[in-house]
């Protein structure tokens, strides 16, 4: 991808009523790593996130808490959702709320266009509605209830009874787009990723699409249907539009054309909304579909799914309080194959923190900086003649940079980190083998010592650039000790070309301090 290309990446917007758990933070970190990487290789990157604030469930909770739904949403955005981004160090470019005037206006513009163009009609609808999902359920989506709900049909996700609703609603002619969607999946095989999610989506659409009920009359917490204000827009139809209302749909064509289409990261449980309904809506409006919809896996804790609808989650801060935000980001990007389910455990994060971050990377950084400080008074040594061992380090830098860059283009975030870690291991092995501390004892080996430390520092700087999208805090600290200019302006796809400062500054402390108690007290 040539420099300056648009890279617009969006996370799903958070449903404000949920409690932030590590699953939400996981999506955010993945999107942030991809955005930082692209930004740092010179692409026109833009990271969008935000909150989903309409719908019956919010209205009900707000009412039961004695406040207006807007007050309830404001409170949750301020107290829960924006702080989550701080906790895991997300550098988003925008934060959209579905209660923003810019969003509500954009939804109405979009809806009016579809209505004028004949894609929306009025009809009667009866169906089983799950308030938890904010979705009408097909009979196949229901299961037999247990415990207090025995004898009833319940939502398979929420295990709670559904409501039989009958309404006169507006419908979107989604069935018109069945063939066009199948053509899209066929002609653009990477539109939905990974393959497991793609196959499920194709099977779902092949079973036939029904028109979608897109308005409600039974409550009023939502965007009003512009030609019939007794109706509010169905919350999913409203929420999906955030991806275009945030970038100026209908009001700023230049900005819209600059950004759209987006790369969209979603949990696989909401892939259907993003890979079926959303592209159909865009097709109806004559707009391009997203570049990719990537459905990542679930985080399991003790083998159990962490879902956005169940309150079994671990708060991200429980982890960052112990290990810090860098370790949170590193762990989830490294330990879990992006696109598959992955298991979280305190033992695993603790082991990786110690072995990979503290002993692997952190210790390497401390040793190289300390030896240059000790043997050369901090002045960066100049390499003499290079041996095969030195050249092998340089070759590894170039190779892993290309491999990581290619992996990022495939959304293989964990593979990018594995490639980068080859350089950590190579450098640690190189130093062990070259024994600079032994060379330092022999004045006649002075030039060889300079070459070994210069080569080690080169590699360390390349690592710092490559790791900056993943662990921005530690790499910024290290960069202040060895680098020149802003770390985030170093082209990540040409990481080995970085320039060192003439002198290294001693590191005040280890980049990854010892953790006294790897698991919070229960
Ligand atoms: Zn449900």
Image: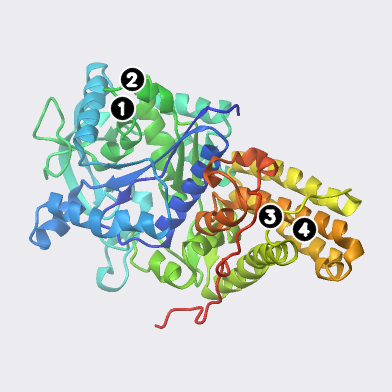
The residue lying toward the viewer, choosing from 301 and 513, is 513
N-terminal of the pair, mark 4 or mark 1, is 1
Residue underneath mark 4 = 453
Figure quadrant of the C terminus: bottom left
Q: Indicate whether 140 appears above or below 189.
A: below
Image position, residue 58 (x, y; %): 19, 53
Please identify, in this view, whether the residue under mark 2 or under mark 4 is nearer the observer.
Answer: 4
- Estimate the x, y position of residue 89 in percent, counting from the top left: 43, 55
Q: What is the image's colouring?
A: rainbow
The reply to whether dot 1 and dot 2 touch (C-beta < 8 Å) is yes
Q: Residue at the location (85% across, 65% down)?
A: 433
Alpha-carbon distance for marks 4 and 1? 51 Å
User: Helix, strand, or loop for circle 3?
Assistant: helix
- How far apart are the two marked residues, 4 and 3, measured between alpha carbons? 10 Å
Q: Which residue is mark 2?
A: 253
* Closest to the observer, 197 or 92: 92
Residue 460, disc: 3
Q: Which mark is residue 414?
A: none
Q: Tell me how far mark 2 sits from mark 4, CA to CA.
A: 53 Å
Q: Which residue is mark 1?
A: 248
């Amino acid at each position: 991808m040539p420099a300056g290309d648009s890279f617009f990446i969006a996370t799903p917007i958070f449903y404000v009523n949920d409690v932030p758990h590590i699953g939400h933070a996981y999506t955010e970190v993945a999107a942030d790593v991809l955005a930082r990487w692209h930004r740092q290789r010179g692409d026109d990157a833009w990271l969008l996130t935000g909150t989903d604030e309409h719908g019956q469930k919010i209205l009900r909770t707000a009412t039961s808490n004695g406040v207006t739904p807007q007050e309830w949403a404001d409170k949750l955005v301020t107290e829960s959702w924006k702080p989550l981004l701080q906790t895991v160090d997300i550098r988003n470019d925008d934060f959209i709320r579905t209660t923003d005037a810019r969003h509500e206006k954009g939804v109405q513009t979009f809806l009016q266009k579809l209505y004028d163009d004949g894609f929306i009609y009025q009809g009667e609808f009866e169906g089983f509605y799950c308030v938890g999902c904010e979705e009408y359920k097909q009979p196949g989506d229901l299961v037999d209830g247990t415990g207090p709900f025995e004898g009833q049909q319940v939502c398979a996700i929420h295990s709670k009874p559904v409501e039989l609703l009958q309404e006169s609603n507006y419908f979107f002619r989604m069935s018109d787009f069945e063939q066009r969607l199948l053509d899209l999946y066929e002609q653009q095989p990477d539109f939905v990723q990974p393959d497991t999610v793609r196959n499920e989506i194709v099977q779902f659409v092949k079973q036939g699409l029904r028109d979608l009920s897109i308005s409600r009359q039974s409550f009023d917490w939502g965007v009003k249907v512009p030609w019939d204000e007794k109706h509010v827009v169905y919350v999913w139809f409203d929420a999906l539009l955030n991806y275009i209302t945030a970038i100026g749909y209908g009001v700023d064509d230049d900005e819209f054309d600059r950004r759209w289409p987006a790369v969209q990261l979603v949990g696989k449980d909401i892939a259907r909304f993003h890979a079926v309904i959303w592209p159909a809506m865009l097709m109806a409006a004559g707009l391009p579909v997203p570049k990719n919809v990537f459905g990542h896996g679930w985080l399991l804790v003790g083998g159990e799914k962490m879902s956005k609808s169940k309150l079994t989650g671990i708060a991200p801060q429980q982890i960052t309080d112990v290990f810090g935000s860098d370790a949170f980001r590193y762990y989830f990007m490294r330990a879990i194959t992006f696109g598959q389910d992955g298991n979280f455990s305190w033992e695993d994060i603790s082991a990786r923190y110690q072995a990979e971050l503290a002993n692997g990377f952190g210790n390497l950084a401390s040793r190289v900086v300390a030896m240059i400080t000790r043997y050369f008074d901090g002045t960066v040594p100049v390499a003499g003649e290079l041996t095969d061992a030195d050249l092998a380090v340089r070759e590894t830098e170039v190779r892993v940079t290309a491999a990581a860059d290619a992996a990022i283009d495939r959304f293989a975030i964990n593979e990018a980190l594995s490639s980068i870690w080859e350089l950590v291991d190579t450098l640690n092995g190189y130093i062990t083998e070259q024994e600079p501390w032994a060379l330092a004892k022999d004045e006649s080996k002075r030039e060889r010592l300079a070459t070994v430390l210069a080569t080690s520092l080169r590699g360390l700087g390349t690592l710092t650039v490559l790791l900056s999208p993943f662990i921005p805090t530690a790499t910024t600290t290290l960069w202040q000790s060895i680098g020149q200019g802003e770390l985030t302006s170093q082209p990540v796809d040409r990481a080995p070309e970085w320039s060192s400062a003439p002198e290294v500054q001693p590191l005040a402390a280890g980049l990854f301090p010892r953790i006294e108690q790897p698991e919070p007290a229960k």
